[in-house]
Amino acid sequence: METWRITLLGDGGVGKTALAVQYTLGCFVETYDPTIEDAYRKQALVDEKMCFIEVLDTTGQEEYAALRDQWVREGQGFILVYSVDSRPTFDRLEVFHQSMLRGKGENPIFIIVGNRFDRTGEREVTYDDGALLAQRLGCKFLETNSINARNVERAFNTLVRALRRNRDRQTVGRRDSNCVVV
């Protein structure tokens, strides 16, 4: 069975843990307990194919920035998370994107997720802001709500599909490069 290691990156308090828990355990965690690093696991059916997904939930605090490079090296795919009710968390996505580029090179596999889209009255980041950033960085974009699980599974499945496409492209490239015509 294929295994995917997905790392959640973003500022503290944006809902990374809530996304991980909602996706892997199917429940919402009400209390905020700052994370340094936690791992969650789930067996999932994505496009009628079983896979094992390991979700690494990381801290967004700057004092742990040195650990971020390790988390990026260990991850295969990434979800960059911000909170739609906090513009600074959106603006700092560039820091996390740069970490991915340093650790993974030119083409890391990732998506951007705007969490807490239910907070319409408190919104500081529009849907279009998120979509434009994703377009500029060359990735998919979704808004999620961890409370009612809206788009949570879709976000992880979208990333798994991107990881599979990347793997398949690399496999085809290797086969082509080893081809000899006699």
Image (tube, helix red, strand yellow):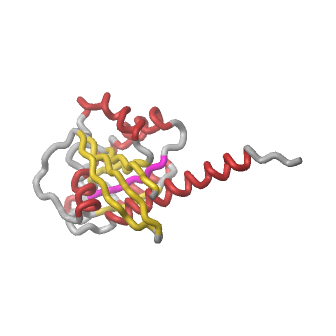
Report if residue 127 is visible in the image. Answer: yes
Q: Residue at x 24, y 45 (%)?
A: 38
Report if residue 128 is visible in the image. Answer: no
**Foreground pick, 7 / 84:** 7
In magenta stretch: residue 146: no
Direction from residue 27 to residue 99 in the image, left or right: right
Point out residue 36 in the picture as x, y percentages from the top left corner.
22, 39
Residue that lies at the very extreme toward the right in this rendered image:
182
Q: Residue at x 23, y 57 (%)?
A: 21
Res. 34 image quadrant: top left
Q: Main secondary structure of the magenta part?
A: strand
- The magenta stretch spans which residues? 109-115
**Foreground pick, 150 / 50:** 50
Point out residue 147 in the picture as x, y percentages from the top left corner.
20, 65
In magenta stretch: residue 111: yes
Point out residue 134 in the picture as x, y percentages from the top left corner.
45, 53
Q: Residue at x 41, y 62 (%)?
A: 157
Residue that lies at the very extreme toward the left in this rendered image:
31
**Foreground pick, 166 / 39:** 39
Point out residue 33 in the picture as x, y percentages from the top left corner.
13, 46
